[in-house]
Image: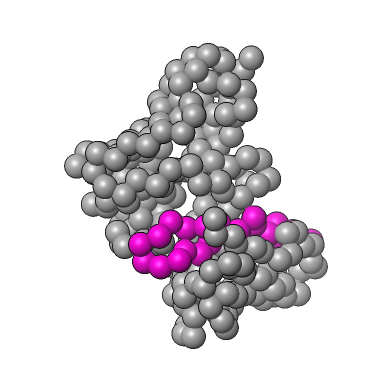
Amino acid sequence: ELKVEQNPLFLSMQEGKNYTIYCNYSTTSDRLYWYRQDPGKSLESLFVLLSNGAVKQEGRLMASLDTKARLSTLHITAAVHDLSATYFCAVDRYNYGQNFVFGPGTRLSVLP
Amino acid sequence: GAVVSQHPSWVICKSGTSVKIECRSLDFQATTMFWYRQFPKQSLMLMATSNEGSKATYEQGVEKDKFLINHASLTLSTLTVTSAHPEDSSFYICSAGQGLVSEQYFGPGTRLTVT
């Protein structure tokens, strides 16, 4: 059974600082997704990582995937308050798209 | 980009009644849609996979007689919560993709409150 873990679950950081969120999963998969969720809202797609070594960047966020280590990271550079949200990673259970197992989420709070 | 809508966005119903939630892919066809449930401050849990023209596949522990799923067309899936109880109160989110090699597009969610 595929299990997905995130670390940390809660993160409070000051503006301007850097930090990394980790996503570990228990079985082989080459597909991993990162989403952002604001309170009361649905999911916003951030990154789609489809192969070992994939690295994608958008603004202050950068995501990477190491399928051999079964690890993905979401790195935050020079955090700003607008990044405050809950971040989820999701792993494709069967490696052919669409059937996801979500991590527990990391609740990020960026303080001024 | 691909858009998925849900209706209603929120609903309040009395215990014992049934509620239907619609999920539509607006600008693409989806042979498969997914239904998730999210309790407050928790993650998303996959409830079932909705397949166009065939029966839904339910995850372990999800009562298929309670959560009825119908995928009548390539753009519409419905989730009916039958005989709702307060513990069914949750945020229900659907998603759809454009094929096997595709990311999922999530609907805006439906907040169900059962009184």
- Among the 4 quarters of the image, the one containing residue A89: top left
Task: State the image coordinates of residue B22 (x, y, percent, origin top left).
Answer: 66, 71
Is residue B2 visible to us here? Answer: yes
Q: Quadrant of the C terminus of chain A?
A: top right
- Please, which colouring scheme is shown? one colour
Q: Nearer the viewer, residue A79 or B90?
A: A79
User: Image check: A24 left or right of B19?
Assistant: left
Against B1, is A5 above or below? above
Q: Nearer the viewer, residue B30 or B78?
A: B30
User: Image check: B56 left or right of A43?
Assistant: left
Q: Which residues are magenta?
A: B95-115
Among all residues in the image, which is located at the extreme left?
Answer: A68
Q: Nearer the viewer, residue B38 or B75?
A: B75
Asked if residue B96 is among those painted magenta in the image, a careful observer would answer yes
Task: State the image coordinates of residue A96 (x, y, percent, origin top left).
Answer: 31, 62
Residue at 56 percent across and 81 percent down: it is B73
Against A24, is A79 above or below? above
Against B56, is A14 above or below? above
Is residue B93 visible to us here? Answer: no
User: Image check: A1 left or right of A8?
Assistant: left
Task: State the image coordinates of residue B110 (x, y, percent, origin top left).
Answer: 68, 59
User: Image check: B5 left or right of A87?
Assistant: right
Residue at 35 percent across and 55 percent down: it is A92
Residue at 69 percent across and 73 percent down: it is B20
Q: Nearer the viewer, residue A20 or A2?
A: A20
Residue at 46 percent across and 85 percent down: it is B54
Q: Quadrant of the N terminus of chain A?
A: bottom left
Among all residues in the image, which is located at the extreme bottom?
Answer: B53
Task: State the image coordinates of residue B87 (x, y, percent, origin top left).
Answer: 66, 60
Asked if residue B49 is among those painted magenta in the image, a careful observer would answer no
How many discs mark residues in the rendered view?
0
